[in-house]
Amino acid sequence: MKIVTQADRSFIPSLKKASLRGRAAGAAVEKTVRTILQAVERGGDKAVLRYTKQFDKVSLKPEDLRVTPEEIKNAYFHIRKDEGDALRLAAQRITAFHERQRTKTWMYQDNDATLGQVVTPVDAVGIYVPGGKAVYPSSVLMCAIPAKVAGVPRIVMVTPPQKGGINPYLLVAADIAGVTEIYRLGGVQAVAALAYGTNTIAKVDKIVGPGNIYVATAKRLLYGTTGIDMVAGPSELLVVADDEAKPAHVAADLLCEAEHDEDAQVFLVTTSERLAKDVGKLIEAQLKGLQREKIASKSIARHAVAFVVGTMDEAIEVANDIAPEHLTLSVDNPFDYLEKIRHAGALFLGRYTPPSVADYIAGPNHVLPTGGTARFFSPLSVNDYVKVSNIVHYTKQELAKVKDPLVRLANIEGFDAHAKSAQSRFS
Amino acid sequence: MKIVTQADRSFIPSLKKASLRGRAAGAAVEKTVRTILQAVERGGDKAVLRYTKQFDKVSLKPEDLRVTPEEIKNAYFHIRKDEGDALRLAAQRITAFHERQRTKTWMYQDNDATLGQVVTPVDAVGIYVPGGKAVYPSSVLMCAIPAKVAGVPRIVMVTPPQKGGINPYLLVAADIAGVTEIYRLGGVQAVAALAYGTNTIAKVDKIVGPGNIYVATAKRLLYGTTGIDMVAGPSELLVVADDEAKPAHVAADLLCEAEHDEDAQVFLVTTSERLAKDVGKLIEAQLKGLQREKIASKSIARHAVAFVVGTMDEAIEVANDIAPEHLTLSVDNPFDYLEKIRHAGALFLGRYTPPSVADYIAGPNHVLPTGGTARFFSPLSVNDYVKVSNIVHYTKQELAKVKDPLVRLANIEGFDAHAKSAQSRFS
């Protein structure tokens, strides 16, 4: 792990580089993605299956796309009982947390007028679940449960076709979470099918879930044609640690994110140069023998940085500048720092909150803004699956009271039909 | 106004066409916009000023971009006192409504764990205000006040340069609403400057406000680089009216939206063919002599449709299929229908709620989802200007309780560093 101190001239460029991570794809990717989107919009199932053959090397007929109830039932026989129980426990805790996020309809009387907001669930959502060797049933729970809690009636999951069938953990997680349709379909063609609809897959109103740069770009280009969640990039963790932090715990926490992806990025910000050095050594030691040692090693070598700062306040400022996906505060009194922290997807407080407890079982969502987007994006939540309608009800009496300023404002903007629509009620 | 009945074979294609309105721009616009975005990202102020000269035919130096405090002060001398009072009244009512939208930080104890959400304002937002002949100070209030209520410290407005200076109504509205910086800058170059920052304009975290197809595409391409609000299209109003509705009021309400834009679209859905015919005639009569007669006439001729249906339930279903920006319920008991309405940006209830009272003075936001996007987008609100950080705090004791299922889930996903980060606390 590279260590930089504020005295180093390398501190500022490192910080600047850190805050420039995770930039959007450029014109070339956009062009490729736009071509596939248009082909699926025009060609429907036929285009979807052509791209599936081309990219996933799997030949399917339209009727093969949907995963059958039997396949889902069979999936339970391919996982252990204690694994199913762990998924169910996680689902319960995720449900409990997200039930507190429910936004309610509200109205109030403003003299004789009634104003308010009606909150309704989206009709249908699509959840993109990446394929490949690594499977993340926990992400299926995190994406689907808030939709279920929001009251979304149609929850569709898509995941790339696999030679041996869809991974049973994904199917069980989808079933536990309340997914209502599953299709073996991935890549830009899956996102396009969800957005535009095909003969086999009815269109959805919102698409969520992480994917590679092509999937992420497809979602971005479709923003407004359909709703999307945040644009996800590689995982990140920033640990703010004081002198008392245990180096072994800090190293273990940093490796949690590093094992996700070669492009995952971890930061340590500490007032203790000794801690930074010890953590660096322990990371090397703990890397040995990890199942994903290669991936984690590359992530650490390429991206890991320890910033040594003078005070805890400076440490928090570095954290705010980076606006990390995950921010661990390894201090004794973490709640004292809450007011100073402006940007982070999730905060892991204290010495006994490893990232993994939040990733899997605590309850809050683990789909979080990355690449500095915690400056404006929020964690995936029930609010992503509902929408609001403003409510305005006026009586004749109340309209009479505001007619004059209303007409004045309409006249400023040159909208006399606006003025007349109010005046017509009194003529 | 074209009238279609359910018996007509034209009913279904009309409905389908209605729900396909407002599609996203294609590859050609994306390419043009991407070029400008890249030029501004690389060239900063220089590129911004080059495009301003090219598109707005105005030559500026960097130091001319920012509107000065003197210009803002002078603007008050160019508007009448009753106009300023009307803007202030609107601002008060908008503030009062949006204060009810504030989302609060919450936390709770889950046994020995603490879970919750911290809500914080975005650091800086940019508001795009279109130029041209028509000026909408009301939209400045609607975009800026929720940011102010959210507690955003830096509220930046951009609007295209005008030969005679920025319109004084826009400047007064910005001042009343609490805008902190104003730049005379428009088009894709303004959006790019806000997203990437230049020497003169510091970058913002979120960009809101309506614009033409190029501005809208720029925002879409920047989604994830910066936060954006919904992608806005032409105005829409759908009026559901029963037999008792007054044709003159319905016609006046429909013209309110039609005068916005030649591409604005209005719909009438009614159980009364007589009403549809009367409204059609009255629209023609009321059009005569409107300041914006040409625009409104084109909108009506091109896009206006009246659907005649058998029952009020069918009328609501048509409204749900179209998912309009504005939905008027011209009935005596509008609250009885609320549960059946699934998709609309704003609901205007009853006989005495013309669209103009909601546009200007009622208080709820008038920046609303168009083009059927009310299926997944919500009105602009305080929530667009804040973001959430999830909070997780575990104690050693609580971590011990969930360690085993946590390790099981980590093993399913092949993440042994995740498992070890929890186990390390007990070794």
Image (spheres, coloured by chain):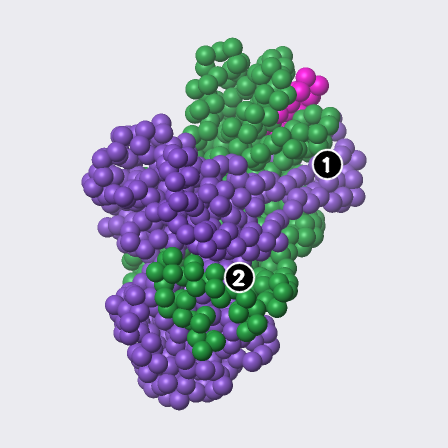
Chain colours: A green, B purple
Residue projecting furthest to the top: A7
Vertical side of B142 occupied by A315: above or below? above
Q: Amino acid at mark 1?
A: Tyr
**Which x, y percent locates residue A236?**
53, 33
The answer to whether B393 appears left or right of B42 in the picture is right
Position above or below: B301 against A33: below
Disc 1 target residue: B394
Does the rendering let one see residue A383?
Answer: no
Residue at point 33%, 76% (across, down): B286
Q: Position of residue A9 (x, y in %)?
A: 45, 12
Letter of the chain that mark 2 sits on in the rendering: B
Crowd tier of the residue under label 2, counting other residues whose Cα lies within 10 Å: few below 14, some 14–19, many 20 or above: many
Q: Is residue B110 left or right of residue B419?
A: right
Residue closest to the eye, B120 or B66: B66
Q: Amino acid at mark 2?
A: Ala
Cβ–Cβ under 8 Å for marks 2 and 1: no
Residue extent of the magenta highlight: A240-259
Please identify the quadrant where the N terminus of chain B is shown. bottom left
> Is the residue at mark 2 from the same chain as the one at mark 1?
yes
The C terminus of chain B lies in which quarter of the figure? Answer: top right
Q: Position of residue B118 (x, y in %)?
A: 64, 41
User: What label sits on residue B362 in the rendered view?
Assistant: 2
Residue drawn at x 48%, y 72% is: B328
Q: CA distance from mark 2 to mark 1?
A: 46 Å
Image position of A300 with respect to B27: above or below: above
